[in-house]
């Protein structure tokens, strides 16, 4: 199977050849309006897997027809950028809707009536309540990174969007890992869902080394600094908590390491610039949390660094999926103490072979560097003491009287400084009645 002739020229221009397993498996079901759950490894081309067959069904100029939901701003922008050239080939418009972006500018762009919208759920519902976006013309809704999107408030917001859409709207769920929510989609959304799982047959991923670096908590940022000193080093550093990210960023700033951070507090323009600079190699480290780093596609990313041991195996899989994409090699490094290392091995077994690497200078080595011990102090051996020469008495030729006077002569006493006169003691100015004041006051009632 090959792509539609509408997109063949662009497909060849981007260097693609055959369809990946997920792209081939979901092509016909999506074209036939079926609701599906697509499971495939990270980096296997899921974005084009769901966008190409849906683009073939779009009618230009007929309003909003395809809605793609993603869990983060970065993934929304990335998905829009991947789809936009193909949409332009059929004269369609794609609009990105995210939080922290200029809402007035987004509303202005919506006046062009885009056929495709890629959005985060929060801002999308906000504009829907203002009647700036209407769902009555929707044909398909895609949930990208569905295992992350359909958690907590994301699940309720997504269900609300589906309920506001036509009853026969087509649903598509795509993820690299399965969760309890994904196995029960028919209950949550009330429509039959066909599961298409190609994870066991997909071999598009490259060789990835999974390594653990024994490191104390206080030394983790120093490890990042040493790694950044390697030639042409680029690493995506993922944190469990935003507070740890901000603290590490402050330390790296003082150490003059080139980095950028995908913080939830930053503006969309700042986050886009951080990603752009990292992709172009202008910065060495990109700091992110799991939500911000989810689904990022960074070409030839050599390193993913887990600043902390992930809380779950699913989390590790998605982090590791940022490197070794589309047949390229990559390395995943995890920092922690020996206890963290044991927990990580239990978490990843038997799917991943975890090796240990040690940081020696600015390089990673397989063996732990030898500890240089201080030389033992030299013990002094007992030696025969060197005999001292004896003094020979010198004859005194002076007369006896002069010799006796010399013996009794005394050295002159040092001159004595006159002592300072003693200061007279200060007389106490206390009267007798004041001295006994307390006694009289105490025995006042006893006096006659």
Image (tube, grey):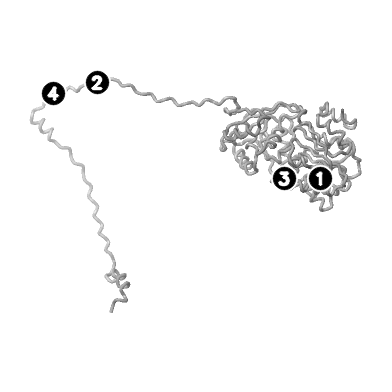
Out of 352 and 3, give the one closest to the viewer. 352
Q: Are marks 3 and 2 in contact (CB under 8 Å)?
A: no
Out of 55 and 417, give the one closest to the viewer. 55
Residue sitting at x 81%, y 32%: 22
Percent across and percent down for residue 269 are 74, 43
Name the front one of labels 3 and 4: 3
Percent across and percent down for residue 291 are 71, 41
- Quarter of the view holding residue 218: top right
Name the front one of labels 2 and 4: 2
Name the front one of labels 1 and 4: 1
Q: CA distance from mark 3 to mark 4?
A: 103 Å
Query: Does 257 appear above or below 62?
Result: above
Percent across and percent down for residue 112 are 87, 45
Q: Are marks 2 and 4 in contact (CB under 8 Å)?
A: no
Q: CA distance from mark 1 to mark 4?
A: 125 Å
Q: Is residue 17 left or right of residue 401?
A: right
Residue 267: assigned label: 3
- Quarter of the view holding residue 54: top right
Out of 387 and 185, give the one closest to the viewer. 185
Which corner quadrant holds the C terminus? bottom left
Q: Earlier in the sequence, mark 3 or mark 1?
A: 1
Residue sitting at x 79%, y 42%: 185
Label 2, on which residue?
387
Q: Is residue 64 left or right of residue 40?
A: right
Label 4, on which residue?
395
SS for callout 1: helix
Label 1, on which residue?
189
Q: Residues within 10 Å of mark 4 (few under 14, many from 20)?
A: few
Q: Earlier in the sequence, mark 2 or mark 4?
A: 2
Can I make out residue 222 in this image?
yes
Q: CA distance from mark 3 to mark 1?
A: 34 Å
Out of 361 and 379, give the one closest to the viewer. 379
């Amino acid at each position: 199977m090959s792509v539609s002739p509408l997109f063949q020229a662009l497909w060849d221009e981007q260097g693609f050849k055959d369809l990946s397993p997920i792209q081939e498996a979901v092509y016909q079901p999506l074209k036939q309006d079926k609701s599906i759950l697509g499971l495939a490894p990270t980096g296997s081309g899921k974005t084009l897997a769901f966008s190409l067959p849906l683009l073939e069904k779009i009618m230009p100029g007929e309003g909003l027809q395809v809605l793609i939901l993603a869990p983060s701003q970065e993934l929304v922008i990335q998905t829009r950028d991947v789809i936009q050239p193909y949409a332009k080939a059929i004269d369609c418009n794609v609009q990105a809707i995210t939080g922290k972006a200029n809402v007035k500018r987004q509303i202005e762009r919506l006046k062009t009536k885009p056929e495709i919208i890629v959005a985060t759920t929060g801002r999308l519902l906000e504009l829907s309540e203002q009647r700036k976006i209407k769902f009555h013309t929707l044909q398909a809704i895609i949930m990208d990174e569905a295992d992350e999107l359909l958690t907590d408030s994301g699940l309720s917001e997504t269900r609300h969007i589906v309920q506001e859409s036509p009853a026969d709207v087509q649903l598509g769920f795509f993820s690299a890992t399965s969760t309890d929510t994904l196995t029960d989609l028919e209950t949550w959304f009330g429509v039959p869902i066909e599961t298409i799982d190609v994870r066991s047959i997909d071999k598009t991923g490259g060789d990835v080394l999974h390594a653990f670096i024994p490191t104390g908590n206080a030394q983790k940022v120093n490890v990042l600094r040493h790694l950044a000193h390697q030639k042409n080093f680029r690493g995506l550093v993922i944190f469990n908590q935003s507070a740890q990210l901000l603290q590490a960023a402050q330390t790296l700033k003082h150490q003059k390491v080139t980095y950028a951070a995908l913080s939830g507090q930053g503006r969309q323009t700042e986050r886009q610039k951080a990603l752009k600079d990292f992709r172009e190699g202008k910065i060495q480290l990109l700091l992110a949390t799991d939500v911000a780093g989810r689904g990022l596609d960074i070409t030839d990313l050599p390193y993913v660094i887990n600043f902390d041991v992930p809380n779950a195996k699913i989390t590790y899989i998605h982090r590791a999926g940022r490197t070794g994409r589309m047949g390229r090699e990559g390395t995943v490094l995890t920092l922690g103490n020996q206890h963290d290392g044991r927990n990580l091995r239990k978490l990843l077994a038997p799917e991943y072979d975890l090796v240990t690497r040690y940081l020696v200078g600015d390089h990673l080595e397989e063996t732990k560097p030898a500890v240089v011990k201080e030389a033992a102090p030299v013990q002094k051996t007992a030696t025969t003491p060197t005999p001292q020469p004896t003094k020979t008495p010198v004859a005194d030729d002076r007369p006896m009287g002069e010799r006796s006077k010399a013996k009794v002569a005394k050295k002159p006493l040092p001159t004595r400084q006159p002592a300072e006169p003693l200061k007279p003691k200060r007389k106490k100015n206390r009267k007798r009645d004041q001295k006994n004041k307390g006694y009289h006051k105490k025995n006042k009632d006893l006096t006659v």
